[in-house]
Amino acid sequence: MIDFSVEPEFQARLDWMDQFVREECETMDLLFPEQGAQFDPNYTAARRHLKPLQEQVKAQGLWACHLGPHLGGPGYGQVRLALMNEILGRSGWAPVVFGTAAPDTGNAEILAMFGTPAQKQRFLGPLMAGDIVSCFSMTEPQGGADPGVFTCKATREGDEWVIEGEKWFSSNAKFAAFLLVLAVTDAEAPLTERMSMFIVPTETPGIEILRNVALIGDLDPENGHHAHLRYNQVRIPADHLLGEVGGGFRVAQARLGGGRVHHAMRTVGLCNRALAMMMERAVSRETRGRKLADHQLVQAKVADSIVELEQFRLLVLKTAWIIDEVEAGRMPHGSARNWIGMCKIGLVKLYHDVVGRALEVHGSLGISLDLPLSRWYAGHMALAFADGPTEVHKSQLARAFLKKAKPAPGLFPTEHIPSRTAAALARYPDARRP
């Protein structure tokens, strides 16, 4: 039976998180709103304010909870993590305060899963402590997230790997202490065996940041933190390979599922905040002699948002539950794949619709930068491309379900009423006899 309830002790932790995020993390959003400020280890004032908050989180046992016990984490499970991420979604700074910011969470996960003891000591330890940030360098300018057209390559030369090529949208590269780079090591191999994953310290000669690209919703177009990189004969020791030669695709896939669920539940948290803003505005503002809340169109916006939020929240929680069942061995491996895709598909529309309605109810104030709504609204498109294009997930989900579909056995569909009625009468010829 599916049960999303939690014991009172964990609910108390969620309650503490909720108050802490509202009081402290949202305050950091106001004090340090600069683009990419959360990831800049050299932003002295922000780091001075951040460290005591992180210590409070650690004291509560809520630091970096995304790793399971087999990877050295507390092992909360995906349902609990989803409930936690719902709270963290209210604030841009909250994931950093709680040690769960992307791409560091996924990078930590695969370092824990595939890293050697020496790799874990050098890279995972400081990353988990929050002393450094990292970058996941996968997509390429000529093909985006399609691994079939990747050209950035790594060649073995003695005791070194030499990486050459370009990468696109390598988030936080300008702040990172190291990059995880997916490079082609055998162009003739099958796609899933063509690439390998490498740990590349950012001080390595030959790493060139061509541009730091800003996103829709960013306030400074010249100071983005998604880098267009060139690896110009970048030489790293042979022991900087993460996992096996040709195993890069498997390593990359291992970091994506949980992250998509966390993105989805953080979207619920942000949309809950937008809904609260919408309702506050509705009962505060008057037009034509009545509160906005008394107008049916506004009531419809509120009602639609409530229903859509609850539907999506339950979808994410069920997905998290399935992942936990897989981890516990009660469901076969891969059972969550389609559900994770549903979360990725649904979050974009939810984000767009709920935040968009809140913006509309606020009118000109909504589209101004005096409120966060316009920045959130612009940012929904960026989220649509996080962890892969949404269209890819739609296609994969449809194909998975279409495999189970069977063609109609005859000329007409199986639900053809005349055909079904004839079959029913043939089965029970006396059924309609007076």
Image (cartoon, rainbow, N blue to C red):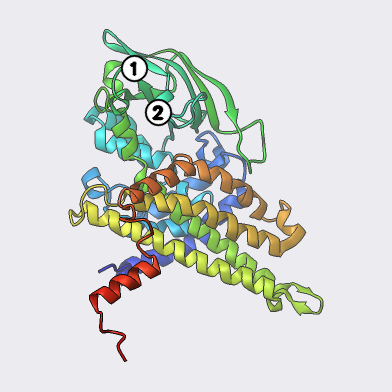
Foreground pick, 245 / 175: 245
User: Mark 1 = which residue?
Assistant: 187
Q: Amino acid at mark 2?
A: Pro
The residue at the far bottom in this view is 434
Foreground pick, 149 / 275: 149
User: What label sits on residue 355 in the rendered view?
Assistant: none
Q: Secondary structure at mark 1?
A: loop
Res 148 quadrant in image: top left
Q: Secondary structure at mark 2?
A: helix
Image x and y of residue 107, in percent: 36, 36
Residue 353 in view here:
yes
Q: CA distance from mark 2 to mark 1?
A: 11 Å
Image x and y of residue 425, in percent: 29, 76
Q: Amino acid at mark 1?
A: Ala
Res 395 quadrant in image: top left
Q: Is residue 157 above or below residue 69?
A: above
User: Mark 2 = which residue?
Assistant: 147
Q: Earlier in the sequence, mark 2 or mark 1?
A: 2
Q: Is residue 146 above or below residue 165?
A: below
Foreground pick, 412 / 297: 412
The residue at the far top in this view is 158
State which quarter of the image contains the N terminus. Answer: bottom left
